[in-house]
Amino acid sequence: MKKSFIAAVIIAAASQALADNVVYIGAGGQLGTFEQTNTANFDSADFTALQLTLGAYIYGNHALEVRFTNGISGEKFTHSGDEQTIEVSDAMSVFYRYDIELTESTKLYPLIGVSEAEFDVEYTNSSNNNYTIIDSSGLSYGIGLSTEISEDMRHYAEYISYFSDDKG
């Protein structure tokens, strides 16, 4: 029910945005860190991923975005004597975005939404000899800055906190 409602809102917004020529598509790289501070002897692990962004301005400076992420590589670490590698398998986020114009070609924007991701943990030298899947979802928020390079191209820099899985 929740996923179909989100899809219906996005389709309705995209339909209106297509009529007004305010749909945008972006692709980029992502450097991320998986943190789980409530786990003994483990703080974080870094990963890299590719991200596809589909967005539409629904009214003025208000936009909705859907982001699809697919992992490229992860970080090896040792936890409880087992050598492991963690990487993001895939993720999807839905964001509300509001552009604040700083100059004619530069915009600052906050992001707020929800994300769902799957992380793969591969055990490379343990009796497990396989991998574990970690599912995470929750509130996501961040801030970004975009600068126009040409009429059809912009450069983006963002900091986003996707979710926290810490329970205590």
Image: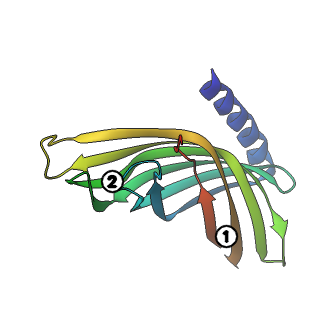
Dot 1 lies on which element? Answer: loop
Q: Can you give x and y, in whole percent of width and height, for residue 128 in the image?
A: 16, 40
Disc 1 from disc 2: Cα separation? 36 Å
Which quarter of the rendering shows the C terminus?
Answer: top right
Foreground tag (1 vs 2): 2
Residue type (three-letter) at the residue carrying disc 1: Asp
Residue at image location 53% in from the left, 40% down from the top: 167
Residue 146 sits in which quadrant? bottom right
34 vs 84, left or right, is right
Residue type (three-letter) at the residue carrying disc 2: Ile
Q: Can you give x and y, in whole percent of width and height, for residue 114 in the image?
A: 63, 42
19 vs 37, left or right, is right
Q: Can you give x and y, in whole percent of width and height, for residue 124 in the image?
A: 17, 52
Q: Which residue is mark 1?
A: 152
Residue at image location 52% in from the left, 54% down from the top: 52
Residue at image location 48% in from the left, 45% down from the top: 91
Q: Can you give x and y, in whole percent of width and height, for residue 25 in the image?
A: 61, 56
Looking at the image, tell me whether mark 1 or mark 2 is earlier in sequence order: 2
Dot 2 lies on which element? Answer: strand
Q: Is residue 151 visible?
A: no
Q: Relative to the observer, which residue lies in front, 127 or 81?
A: 81
- Check disc 1: other Cα within 10 Å, few if <14, some if 14-19, many if 20+: few
- Check disc 2: other Cα within 10 Å, few if <14, some if 14-19, many if 20+: many
Residue 161 sits in which quadrant? bottom right
Which quarter of the rendering shows the N terminus?
Answer: top right
Q: Relative to the observer, which residue lies in front, 93 or 84?
A: 84
Q: Which residue is mark 2?
A: 86
